[in-house]
Amino acid sequence: RQLQLRATANTDMSNPTEDMPCITFTYSGEADHSVALVGCFNSWNGERDMLTKNPDGKWEVTKALPPGRYEYKFLVDGERFVEDTNAAERDMDGFGGSHSVITVGNDVGLDLDDTAGKLVVQHDRGVAYSQ
């Protein structure tokens, strides 16, 4: 048995609740001064979810997201959109490129008997479980 959940492109999640899982997005590419996370979860707003540069040079932001399927990109230095190289899947963006996609949910795409109700995040490097 599988459960598939989706979020629409117009979903505004600027006020997350405590029940939402927190997902960390990481950008490891070149950036002079800023990296923002933009996607259907924040109306593609380049000012809402700014990443912070870590001492190791990687940029990160942690965002609470309810179960669903989300298209997103990184906005680097306020002028260029970059796909997440760690994304499990991609969808066409309508401009000749593609969006990164993350699916967040309770047992999304997995056998419910095997995961025992754990939160599941699908990623290209496997599946991460949160208890």
Image (cartoon, rainbow, N blue to C red):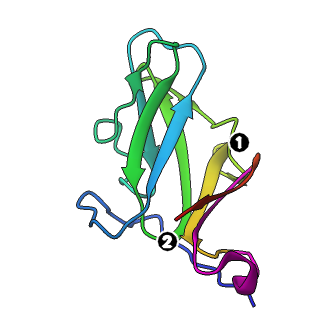
Q: Is residue 118 magenta?
A: yes
Q: Kindly identify which residue carries mark 2.
A: 67
Residue interval drawn in magenta: 109-123
Looking at the rendered structure, the secondary structure element under dot 2 is loop
Q: How many neighbours does mark 1 have within 10 angstroms: few (below 14), some (14-19), or many (20 or more)?
A: few
- Which one is in front, 81 or 49? 49
Give whichever of discs 1 and 2 has the lower sequence position: 2
Q: What is the spatial separation of the Cα atoms under label 1 and label 2, in whole angstroms?
A: 28 Å
Q: Is residue 93 visible?
A: no
Hey, what amino acid is under mark 2?
Pro
Q: Kindly identify which residue carries mark 1.
A: 96
Q: Is residue 18 magenta?
A: no
Question: Which residue sits furthest bottom?
Answer: 1
Residue at 39 percent of width and 49 percent of height: 63
- The quadrant of the picture occupied by the N terminus is bottom right
Numbered tag placed on residue 130 in the rendering: none
Question: Which residue sits furthest left?
Answer: 15
Front position among marks 1 and 2? 2
Q: Quadrant of residue 19?
A: bottom left
Q: Quadrant of residue 104?
A: bottom right
Q: How many neighbours does mark 2 have within 10 angstroms: few (below 14), some (14-19), or many (20 or more)?
A: many
